[in-house]
Image: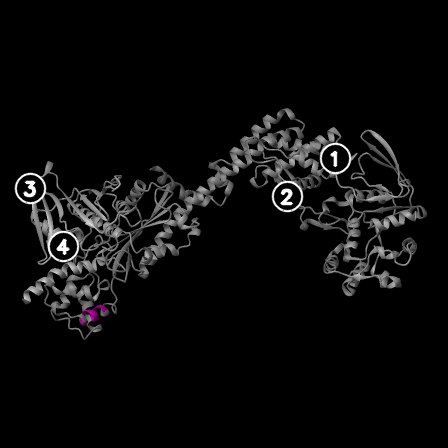
Amino acid sequence: MSEKKAMEKLEELGKSMLSQVSEGKSPTFDTPLRSRGNVEFQDGLGYLKLGSKKEERTFLNVSQARTFMQTVAVANKTRKFIAENLHTSIRGLYYQLKFSLGDDVDESLFEEQSESNVLIEDLEVSLGIKREDLHLTTDRKGVVAGPMVVKDNFTGEETTIDCTKQGRSGWMIPSDVDNGMEFVDVGADYVLVVEKDALWQRLNEDRFWKKENCILVTPKGQASRGTRRLLRKLADKKLPVYVMTDCDAWGWYIYWTIKTGSMNLAYLGRDFSIPESRFLGVTMADIEKYDFLKRLTINAKEIDLKRAEEMLSYPWINRHKEWVVELQKVLKTKKKIEQDALQGERLTFVGEYVREKIEKKLWLP
Amino acid sequence: MGDGIFSKFKEYSVAEFFKKNRQMLGFSGKVRSLTTIVHEYVTNSLDACSEAGVYPEIEVWLASEGEDKYRVRVKDNGPGIPKSHIGKALGMMLAGTKFNRYMQQRGQQGIGATGCTMYALVTTGQPIRVVSSHDGNMVECEVGIDFRNNKPLINLISEGPAEGGKSGLEVDGVFGEVKYDKSAYGVYEYLRRTAIANPHAAIVFNSPEGERFVFPKSVDELPKKPVEVKPHPLGISAHDLIEKARNAPYQRISSFLQEEFTRVTLNKIRELQEAVPEVDLGKKPSEMGWEDAEKLVAGFRKIKWIAPATDSVVPIGTRQIEKSLSSIISPEFMHVTERAPKIYRGGIPFVVEVGLAYNGKGANGEILRFANRAPLLFDAGGCAITQTIKSIDWKRYGIKSLEEEPLSIFVHFASVHVPYTSAGKQSISDEEEVVDEIRNAVMEAARGLERHLSGKRRTKEMVSKRAAILRYVEQLSVDLAELGGRKAESGKVKERLLKMVEEKYSLGNMGAEEGAGEREKGQSAPEEKEGAEE
């Protein structure tokens, strides 16, 4: 289990710094730089990751002393969480560490949550572990339905969850799908991710997942950490992952974040990206193909066009000529269309649309 | 009858002239008038002591005698005045001996002690009481002026052997239309500054409020006596040239120039004659007319001269200024320049001495101006010293705003000829070489101050850095020990961390920590030490 690995890494960090102190050296650790200049994309890997640039954090440096102390405090506190098998949010952690440094000192260990948030990322990166392994929960957002059985070992009780029996609401993806979670039976043929909850509900009502024997997921916008981890695990089980979003740069970027990760969160690396995923739609080509969609387009806004231009400049996107064509169409026509528009003619059209795309392999890389 | 009108006219004219022109003599404004009176007496005392080679001990008393009326009493330990000269010194106009002497001397403001006697008579009708002990004899008398004949009126009070054989002079008078205050133009400030520029003198001031201020002597060394020197051709005006020529005992202008001026040789006379063929250098100096003088002065400028010797200039001295600043301002730090004399207008030697005193008893950003050891209190705005100081970019030297920093700026200008802007002799004109030298001297001192301030800043930074890190040691020790699985050792970890912080952020380690600071360490340290000594 990965929380065990996290525990070992934390103790290792503590021991190495203790031995530095006993040698009369300033306690120090290295952490990879998380700036954009240190974000790399490698063709062979298919996802964004941090490069080799590192920086040293050391206590005996005035500009680093406070954050250094704070980082060690976060490390020690999460070590206790793991040892006690208790979980909390990053906000909960912040409140645990918000106390005065002494009666005669007008300073708290932490003043703002933003201070502790970045240090959690520091720890994740420098130790190569995930915050979920540190017993830190994140907001849940995604929902699942379909042929998948999960055993959830929670607070000492084991619950079996069958995702075909979750009614209209579906199973909400927890923040951590690694620790205490076991995927006992995944009998689906593929995974379908739809950006919007409204479309998910439509397809769920159609029992689309049953007819297609697929796992139906909605991240409800940008995918949460838990959702991305779940998709990664399903992809690891050799299930194809198909994604559907709005036809605009923002929607497409949701796909790209799922596929390659994002620059801001490049430190998450492979565990949170699914390079195998494929994009079903909606595409600019669809607007030309389906007559009824033509009248359902809306005008692209300035920020949509700006985002499209940015995406054209990203090497991991512009290496795919299909995407270059799509993005350039956005810039040229200045149009966009929502995935909900697929219901414009018939409510059941969405299902037909997905089926046709998959059967005829009409996806984008 | 005609005689009567003239004598009456004459009687009125001296008094009237004085009344109408008293601002020219320093009697303008009530505060300034009082300062002028004290200045005249104190200057005379300092000069007399200097001539006699004694350390001046001067005491000043001021007492209110009703609205805008003050009694002024000044007593010194100088040689005193012989009975026969008392009238001349205090009751007769233009009796001074300083005129036309080409040597470095205090600014002659107003018309000396006689002017004060006149002011007392005009404003209160009372004569001046004088007690002079000279050569073992004491004379006490009252001195007034017979305006009609410009003659002193002396009323002898008593006479006898001097007490303890000591010499000295005491003058005592009541003056009207004067006012005492503690402003930068008042008597207190005047005496404080006089004391700063005359560290060999002890000055005591008894204020009208009954306070007693003592400015003790701070150096055991009398100032070098200024020597009388011949002027340089480039340092003389047409007016002064005629004055000088009037009584010159020479047959020809050419020999007058050769004898009475420095650097004038026979060769130079030939060059001069070529430059101004229309002036007859063979005629008597007394026959020199205004036009001749103007042409000669213009001719002097056409010729190349060797610069004059600069030994006529007597600075106060770096060490002396340091001692007096320590004694009177007692600053945390000071820097006093020591610079070679320079020459302006090609012919007049001068020296500028600058002292910066930081964080002492002076007013914020005060500029203490002096010419030949006499404080310049008035006309600050029109003075080259003030203007030059204000034009300097003080931020470069770690001074954000001159008016808000505890900095006293001392500037002394010493020269045989001080280029005053006006007859009031309270400000120096902006001669190019003078301005340049003042600027360079102030900047030199400012660099010294900057080194001190940046050293101080570094020390402060070091202390605050250490404090900043130290407050994190406790928490870090606990977390570090627990994280490394050695909870029990947190005390030991803390001890080690404390030791590391103390070592790295000790003041002795300043250069190593800052790197860039190293360069200045060697220079600023000794100055700092000297400033702190006092």
Could one spot residue B192 in this view of the protein? yes
Please state, as top left, top right, bottom left or bottom right, where the C terminus of chain B lies in the image.
Answer: top left
Please state, as top left, top right, bottom left or bottom right, where the N terminus of chain B lies in the image.
Answer: bottom left
Mark 3 chain: B
Q: Disc 1 marks which residue?
A: A135
Label 1: how many residues lie within 10 Å, few (<14), some (14-19) or many (20+)?
A: many
Q: How far apart are marks 4 and 3 (CA)?
A: 26 Å
Label 2: how many residues lie within 10 Å, few (<14), some (14-19) or many (20+)?
A: few
Q: Disc 3 marks which residue?
A: B159
- Given residues B529 and B247, the one toward you in this image is B247
Q: In which quarter of the image is residue B222?
A: top left
In this rendering, which labeled residue sits more in front, label 4 or label 3? 3
Q: Disc 4 marks which residue?
A: B97
Q: Does the magenta stretch include residue B294?
A: yes
The first of marks 2 and 1 along the sequence is: 2
Mark 2 residue element: strand
In this rendering, which labeled residue sits more in front, label 2 or label 3? 3
Q: What stretch is highlighted in magenta?
A: B291-297
Q: How far apart are marks 4 and 2 (CA)?
A: 82 Å
Outermost residue toward the bottom in this view: B278
Give the color scheme: rainbow, by chain, secondary structure or one colour. one colour
Label 3: how many residues lie within 10 Å, few (<14), some (14-19) or many (20+)?
A: some
Mark 4 chain: B
In this rendering, which labeled residue sits more in front, label 2 or label 1? 1
Q: How far apart are marks 2 and 3 (CA)?
A: 94 Å
Q: Pointer 4 and pointer 3: residues touching (CB < 8 Å)? A: no
Residue at left offset 22%, top offset 63%: B236
In this picture, residue A296 sits left or right of residue B171: right
Q: Disc 2 marks which residue?
A: A55
Q: Are marks 2 and 3 on the same chain?
A: no
Mark 3 residue element: strand
Q: Quadrant of residue B290?
A: bottom left
